[in-house]
Amino acid sequence: MAIEIILAAQEDVQAVLQITNEEATRSLATASYSDEPLTRWQEAWVAEHERYPWLIAVERGAQGERHVLGYAKASPFNLRDGFMWSVGLSIYLRPEAQGQGLSVRLYERLFALIRAQGYRSVYARVALPNPASVSLHERFGLERTGLLPHFSWKNEHWYDLAIYTGRLSDSIAPPSPTLSVLEAWKLLS
């Protein structure tokens, strides 16, 4: 079956959260120990989705039903005005969707969108060890610019958190206002 990369809708937030919660129970990729509340994620989607893309990878069933295999999203790096051209990145896939190049497809679309919107810099946190995530972020031009040693406790040990950053533009001109997600989506379609 074909897998599509599309903008997440509000009804997809629960599937996005389910992927995140499953990741919390099986890996160090998120520092959560247990399920996060749906209300918090719904509030984040409402607050962010017009300015920060939330993408999902979906596989359609025989009856047209959607199965969300993974997601990638941008979020505010910091709420202070001077940081409004920088975004944080998140990406998670269901275990059965890993190893098929889906993370690359999600990031290709996400990076195209945030570039079209006018964002200048990206930021990602990677719990170590995680060679697949390190490779993905480096593939998209991010460099490890920091390390927070023994920064999180999970599964009976401390783990390090690597900071990856990248520039989406080399321009030193003053930034323009960013486009909305829908405006950039239309430009790329």
Image: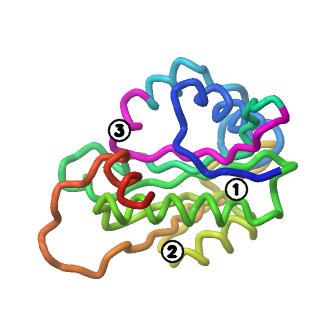
Q: Which residue is mark 1?
A: 159
Q: Secondary structure at mark 2?
A: loop
In the rendering, at what x and y percent does residue 180 appear? 30, 46
Q: Residue at x 34, y 63 (%)?
A: 116
Upstream in the sequence, badge 2 or badge 3? 3
* Residue 160 position (above or below residue 41): below
Residue 72 counted in the magenta span: no
The three-letter code of the residue at mark 3 reads Glu
Q: Which residue is mark 2?
A: 142
- Let me know if residue 39 appears in the view: yes
Upstream in the sequence, badge 1 or badge 2? 2
Q: Secondary structure at mark 1?
A: strand
Q: Which mark is residue 50?
A: 3
Q: Residue at x 70, y 25 (%)?
A: 35
Q: Residue at x 66, y 45 (%)?
A: 30
Taking the view exactly as shown, the residue that stands out farthest to the front is 63
Q: Residue at x 73, y 34 (%)?
A: 66
Stretch of the chain drawn in magenta = 46-62
